[in-house]
Image (cartoon, helix red, strand yellow):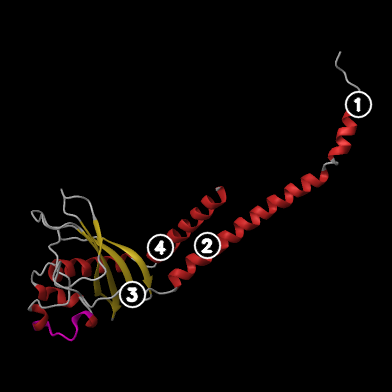
Amino acid sequence: MRQIRILGASFVLALLVVQSASAARLTAADRKAIDHAVDVFVNHAVKRANVGAAYAVVDSNLRGGMTRRQWSHGEIAVYTYPARGTHHPWTVDYVDGNEVGAELMLQPAKGVKSLGAIAFKIYIDRVGGRWLVDELIPAATFAPAGKHPSVTAAADFNPSGPGEGSSSASPRHINPTYAVVPLAVLGGAIIAVMGWALVLAMRDRARREALPPLSIRADDARARPSHRS
């Protein structure tokens, strides 16, 4: 059981190390630029408020060939949600060259009681030295405040918003490096645990072999005089 706990702790540590290493590759300037892109995107494209203002922070993939004028009409392939606030923190999932995958949690605006929080996967690409939003995929929805707690995984959402059909968005391919590294660390942890167990077994065997046979010890004990009166 102790070995299992050690192995589990090693695996969790490996994942944390990989995530920390990914996050470390973003400079302060990168984070500031991504903050700006995400905030503008959510405040205008997701909220559908002055949609044209978000055109400059999305890449050609998300624009889908639309001109600024077409984009500004609001018929865009972006999930709509009445998000609270103007600043929207995100958490790094991975950094792969010029691509950043992140988690984005949005809360409903005050007064909106029919919707709960929603978690997104958001992907931002560096294009021509600028960080631009490439894709936004709903991941899970949460029950509104005051309702029975529940979480719904969102495998298929419509960009237009909750309950309005399905979306063609599919989970984005993750660089296999981020699976290989933790598995390599996990393999090393398994080898270390097996080696440790082998050393203990060899040490115990050597200790047993160093002791004289039980029959000799018993005869020797009977041969010794007793000091009891």
Measure the C-alpha gap from mark 4 to mark 3.
15 Å
Which quarter of the rendered picture does the C terminus lie within? Answer: top right
Q: Residue 224 carries which label?
A: 1
Q: Which residue is drawn at 7% across and 78% down?
A: 73
Disc 2 marks which residue? 186
What x and y, as percent, mark residue 102?
A: 30, 66
Q: Which structural element holds mark 2?
A: helix
Q: Give the range drawn in magenta.
A: 62-69
Q: What residue type is labelled 2?
A: Leu
Disc 3 marks which residue? 99
User: Of the residues under marks 2 and 4, which one precedes in the sequence?
Assistant: 4
Report the front residue among 137 and 33.
137
Asked if the residue at tag 4 contacts the one at tag 2, i.e. Cβ–Cβ closer than 8 Å, the answer is: no
Q: Which residue is drawn at 37% across and 70% down?
A: 95
User: Of the residues under marks 1 and 2, which one precedes in the sequence?
Assistant: 2
User: Of the residues under marks 3 and 2, which one precedes in the sequence?
Assistant: 3
What x and y, as percent, mark residue 33?
A: 26, 69
